[in-house]
Each structure stands twice: as structure tokens, then as C-alpha cells.
Image (tube, rainbow, N blue to C red):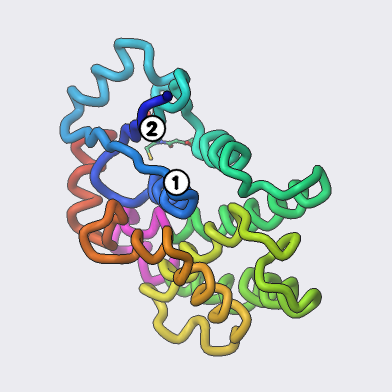
Amino acid sequence: MAGKPILHYFDGRARMESIRWLLAAAGVEFEEKFMKTREDLEKLRKDGSLMFQQVPMVEIDGMKLVQTRAILNYIAAKYNLYGKDIKERALIDMYSEGMTDLNEMVLLYPYLPSRDKDGRLTQIKEKSRNRYFPAFEKVLKSHGQDYLVGNRLSKADVHLTELLYHTEELDSTVLANFPLLKALRTRVSNLPTVKKFLQPGSQRKPFDDRKCVEIARKLFS
Ligand SMILES: N[C@@H](CCC(=O)N[C@@H](CS)C(=O)NCC(=O)O)C(=O)O
């Protein structure tokens, strides 16, 4: 039997957090190897583990996968979180790509210089409220089902739930006008696997501006 996936990253959210969420939602246990210094990153680069010299990298099923979306798609396909046919998969991809566009702004926010933060926060609030959340609310309303695609949990629901939590940390009223998104978040949060991940002490990473920036500076600058 294959061992647990091993996640190589630093001890912060950034690009690895969606992978943690998806594995957790799928009920897959995983190990994490945290890079703490530039030397840790260089070691992975020198031993040929990082195809493009970048992390996240996940060891899974005998592969060393890089590129966040490729990793997420593999996990989704393996654990039946990727729709039942190519049309459902196309919708899941389309929704997930929209979420990624917003998520990129949210996940990079802590690493911005202070002078750029206010502007970015305004942009996140505006895009959440006026572009992305209305679009997903409309999808849920249009079919009246429990999940975004095919009335079955998919990676899109997991990514959206994660994004709703993270956006709300930056703007506590952002979900006020989106009852169906709130209901989706509650539904996904109550799945036993996700519920466990949301408990204190899980491998979910907290929002920690200062710590993330410090580690990232050590590793990547
Ligand atoms: N497209 C890649 C981007 C990965 C990426 O930018 N990783 C950063 C850390 S979050 C990195 O390794 N930076 C060092 C570098 O690019 O040399 C992905 O989605 O995984």
C-alpha cells in the first residue's frame, strides 16, 4: 500500500493550503516536511526534486508533483472530487479557476509591502462582493442543489469553502448578501472529514502575517 503523501513547503498557508484542505476533505492523512531555511530549499533543488525549482511539492504515489493546480487535480481525480464526466469536469475547472484568481490575491496579501496592503484589501473586497461571490451564488440558486456541480461534493466546493473562510478573515461582512454561499460553507464544514480539519490542532494553518513573511523572506529572497 502506498504511504501517506508528503507535503514539502513551509509552515504557512500560501500555495499549499488548498492542497491541505483538499486532502483533508478527501479523508487522506498526510505528512508535512517544513522548510525552515534557504538551505532546506536548496537541498530539494539540488537533489532534483523540484522540476521548476519551486514549491509546493507533493510526494504521492511514487511521483514528486509540483505546480499547485496539477497537484490539486490529481488529488481530485483520485478521490472522486472531479465530477462524473467531462462536462462536469469542465464546470469544476471553470469554477476553480475563477476561485484561483481571487485566491491568488488573498494568499499573496500577507506578503505585500505595507504600502500596497490597503489597496489590495479594497480590491479583494470589491472583487469578492461584486464579481466572484455573486457568480457562485447564482450557480447555486440556478439549480437549487447542495453542491456546485452534479449535486455531489467536488474540489470546487472545497476550494470555495476555504476561500470563504479566508476572505471573511479579511472582511467580516463579506458574506452578508450571500445566503447560499453561507449554507454551502456550513454544509461542507459539517462533513466529518472537514469538521475534523477545522478543529484546533489539525494541519490547517492559521492566518499569521508576520510569521509567514519572515519564513518566506528567509526561503525565497
Ligand atoms: N505556478 C507555481 C508557482 C509556485 C511558486 O511560485 N512557488 C514559490 C513559493 S510559494 C516558489 O517556489 N518561489 C521560488 C522561486 O520561484 O524560485 C504553482 O502554482 O505551484
Most common SS among magenta residues: helix
Residue beneath disc 1: 23
Q: Are marks 2 and 1 in contact (CB under 8 Å)?
A: yes
Query: Left or right: 49 with respect to 22?
Result: left
Q: Note whether 183 is above or below 189 in the view shown.
A: below
Q: Residues within 10 Å of mark 2 (few under 14, many from 20)?
A: some
Q: Residue at x 47, y 54 (%)?
A: 25
Q: Residue at x 58, y 55 (%)?
A: 101
Q: Secondary structure at mark 2?
A: loop
Residue beneath disc 2: 5
Which residue is more in the foreground, 3 or 149?
3
List x then y, in percent, for residue 33: 25, 33
- The residue at the far right in this view is 87
Q: Mark 1 CB in 8 Å range of ligand 1?
A: no
Which is nearer the N-term, disc 2 or disc 1? 2
- Magenta stretch: give its range: 107-120
Quadrant in which the C terminus is drawn: top left
Whether the magenta-drawn stretch holds residue 115 is answered as yes
Residue type at mark 1: give it: Leu
